[in-house]
Amino acid sequence: MKLKSIIYSGLLIGAVSCADLDLNPLSEGSSEAWYSNETEVEMSVNDLFRSVFWPGFSDSWTDDFTNREALTPITNATINGEWGTVNNIWSNTYKVIARSNTILLNLDKIQNTVPEQTINKFAGNAHFVRAAKYGELVFLYGDVVYSTSILDLEEAFTLSRTDKNTVKQAVYEDFDQAAALLPESYGSSENKMATKGAAYAYKARFALQMGDLEIARDAAKACMDLGIYELYPDYSELFLTGTRNPSEVIFAMPRSRSLNVTWGVRDYLPRNRGGWGGAQAPSWDLFHAYLCTDGLPIDESPLYDPQNPFENRDPRCAATIVPFGSRHLGFTYQPHPDSTMVMNFNTGTMQTNNDTRSVAQFASFNGLLRKKGVDEEWLPNFQAENDEILMRYADVLLMYAEAKIELGEIEPAVHEAMNAVRARAYGVDPSETAAYPAITTTDQAALRTLLRTERRMEFGFEGIRYSDIIRWEIAEKVLNRDIYGMLDVDELREKVVDQDLWFFPMTPEIDEDGVADLSPMYEAGLVKRLAIRRFEAPKQYLWPIPSKEILINANLDQNPGY
């Protein structure tokens, strides 16, 4: 048999004839005989949606995240072509692109035996995946190797990078094909394949990344005009394990313990429940970005009290970060150094508080714990099966608003989209403007700041921030600011607690991008520097091509600076 669709070094390689055999066992699937019926093609389409092909962007690459143990190659400016993530994303993305190409080039085999609606579903999903994955490559790497055919080994090693603008147009065409072919939904099933709305939404996201504002606006509007998505009424509940397939989710990767598809969450959980107590935690940078309930940033609002920083804040703050003194997973969460005992609501008794560093050395270094999506269901095995939401309707609304703001199209539709997202956070209808800080300004610069802040508040710990700071070209600002946390216990008591300055000893200034300057607290000796972030611009606005690809293909050149 001929060996087809071989992926070597991540490139799009197929039709490699290593050996011709006369034997083709009827009891086993083979690349020669595959795609001969609906079942085989459906299996191949389902394979496009394995989680390994949809890793998402990590919050650890951004200023929303604190890891007490280490920075990443992105946040310490050591990224290079040897980094495993650079190689894995390149390789796995090309694998799934190759599989999409193969499906599209073999659909004629079942053309006369399968209903047209089913053929369209298969083709639409393959076009969607190819578009989304080429779009991801272009965003990360710039010019990339592009092909829609099945390549043999010799041909693959002759390919060079295609200009990203050429690839970009092909991506748009694939998204349009997908939108034309895909259904609006798959009924009541749990199927997480692509839909018409996903094609529109991903096209809008890619267009914003490319700076094509009109395309982004129109694609987002097309998704909105489908009329099948709406914001889930409870922001906090949206992310819990039991909330599956809400009307807001457009595209997600399902997880299931029964299928052994989970993600480890122990780093996020309190030490009082056996977790590792903020080993991975929300950053102070993120915490300070949440507006007050009057709609003003903390350095402008009279409602903000640095000693009670959770009070009078946008509800998404307490939905994302565990408030001090609140009940969390059956315990009172309190990192205060004098709170050596806390209530265990499971037993109704006080017990030693392992979530303060005066008791447990490795409790959260900045006092913060993630709350978003966390619930009792994560216990006791520290494996979560929450669906990984990759696109939801709130993002579509804010992408639409952003495109129109940047185009200077300041009209009621912009306020309606932004206020729908904000009002949901407050649990009210957008028309109840007295119950939340409705957005009314028509100033473009002010709206830009509000939009960027809204996105940060809405999408904290959802893998969205990295794309935003890269496409807004503010990574060199936000990732060249250090990471701060609490002083060591004795010094914390002396300089902060005993001076009645707990929790934050100062209110930082917030700039036009909603970014806090925390350095004055450090310079005053009131907080501790945990790590020094670094980002090298313009180099890091693109990733390096994997070094092994450069070595095996003389036609590939490396991105500048690597």
Image (tube, grey):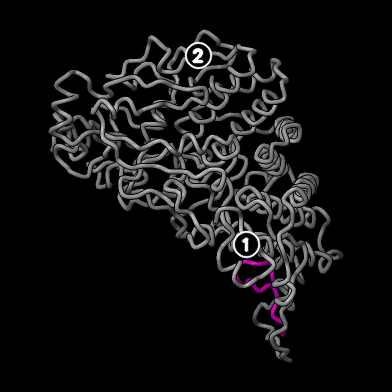
Q: Estimate the x, y position of residue 158 in percent, counting from the top left.
A: 73, 71
Image quarter of residue 285:
top left
Q: Is residue 517 above or below residue 384?
A: above
Which quadrant of the rendered structure holds the N terminus?
Answer: bottom right
Specify the amino acid type for callout 1.
Asp
Q: Estimate the x, y position of residue 306 in percent, counting from the top left.
A: 31, 19
Residue at 37% of width from left, 22% of height from top? 508
Q: Nearer the viewer, residue 239 or 418?
A: 418
List the residue tagged with mark 2. 436
Which quadrant of the rendered structure holds the C terminus?
Answer: bottom right
Q: Secondary structure at mark 1?
A: helix
Q: Secondary structure at mark 2?
A: loop
- Using the image, tell me which numbered label, if any, was put on residue 47: 1
- Which residue range is magenta in the image? 1-13
Is residue 3 in the magenta section? Answer: yes
Is residue 469 in the magenta section? Answer: no
Q: Nearer the viewer, residue 383 or 287?
A: 287
Residue at 70% of width from left, 55% of height from top? 130
Judged left or right of residue 127, residue 209 is: left
Q: How many marks?
A: 2
Q: Are marks 2 and 1 in contact (CB under 8 Å)?
A: no
Q: Estimate the x, y position of residue 454 in percent, counting from the top left.
A: 53, 25
Q: Residue furthest right?
A: 112
Specify the amino acid type for callout 2.
Tyr
